[in-house]
Image: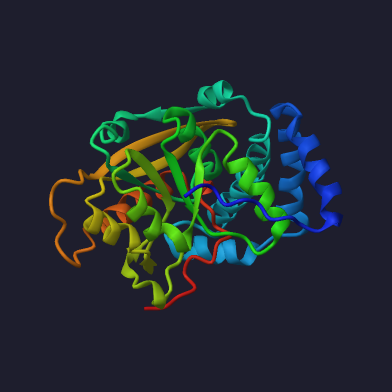
Amino acid sequence: MSTPAAKSFAWYFYPLRWLLLALAHLPLGVLYGVAEAGYFLLAYVVRYRWKLVLDNLGRSFPEKTDAERQRIGRSFYRHFAQVLVETLKLESLDPAELCRRVRIQHPELIARHFEAGRTVLALGSHAGNWEWILPRGAVEYPGRVYGVYKPLSNLFFESFLLGLRTHTGSVLVPMRDTLRDLVRRRNEGRVLSLLTDQAAGPEDRPYWTTFLNQDTSFYTGAERMAAQFNCPVVYVNCRRVRRGYYELTITELHDGQTTLPAGSNLLTEAFARQLERDVQAAPAEYLWTHRRWKHKR
């Protein structure tokens, strides 16, 4: 299975495509100036999902004052605007420059499974710059990086983001094809990346736990796949070191050799605890505009 081919989009999107491509070839320093303008619009003019951001922060950090939570919210918008221009920059970012800007801690925790022909499940989240994780991994492990994604309904943005995310050689797998992809490639040494911090609905057989002081549902598909296919599982945290520079820390959650207890959700709970600590350490770098807690137990 290869990355899905981008479908053609309406002609009136072409001027927007040309504009975005032109912006992508500007130096990052200039793009950060664009990001500052975007931050001002998002946080002070449009106030994009500002109430949702404050609600999420209020429930997640009840011990903080209103002023502290508002400062985190505004810092988040600045970070979010920077992530947007950094994602756009993937179109022209040299792989060597990407490696310089994103350092990987303990890459051997993934690579050591390749010779045994195992698929490593890499569980990530919408923290730091989540859009740079897959392209950086594709440079580190050439020809071995796959990412699960949810296709967009807008054909233009689906095509454009597909090109950015696969620019360094990664392969994207539509979410609905994940199980089929694992069956077909079960003996290939590779890594399959999943962002598993989104809200899981009742149809997803979620695991419920307390996360950031709230009853929270998590996807359990990765745990079930790890048990069925004996996949090693790692947690990947993306942390911003400074503007435009990140560090990926890989933590092993399961070696792929020991048997996982049926229905235990040990890996999902371990993921939730790791993510909680990382969000608490750098709250402004998490995606607070997401409706994370829209489902109830």
Front position in the image: 219 or 3:
3
The vertical placement of 154 against 73, above or below, is: below
The vertical placement of 68 against 114, above or below, is: below
Instruction: Please identify the quarter of the rendering in which residue 201 is found.
Output: bottom left
> Does the rendering let one see residue 61?
no
The vertical placement of 269 against 188, above or below, is: below
Instruction: Please identify the quarter of the rendering in which residue 29 is found.
Output: top right
Front position in the image: 179 or 108:
179
- Residue 237 is situated, as x and y percent measured from the top left of the image, at 40, 42
Q: Which quarter of the rendered picture does the C terminus lie within? A: bottom left
The vertical placement of 199 against 124, above or below, is: below
- Residue 111 is situated, as x and y percent measured from the top left of the image, at 31, 31
Is residue 244 toward the left or the right of residue 28 in the image?
Answer: left
State the scheme by which the image is colored: rainbow
- Residue 220 is situated, as x and y percent measured from the top left of the image, at 32, 63
The residue depicted at 41 percent of the width and 29 percent of the height is 104
- Residue 157 is situated, as x and y percent measured from the top left of the image, at 69, 54
Is residue 258 toward the left or the right of residue 147 in the image?
Answer: left
> Does the rendering let one see residue 97?
yes
The residue depicted at 45 percent of the width and 44 percent of the height is 146
The residue depicted at 37 percent of the width and 41 percent of the height is 191
The residue depicted at 75 percent of the width and 30 percent of the height is 25
Count of numbered badges drawn on the protein = 0
Instruction: Please identify the quarter of the rendering in which residue 107 is found.
Output: top left
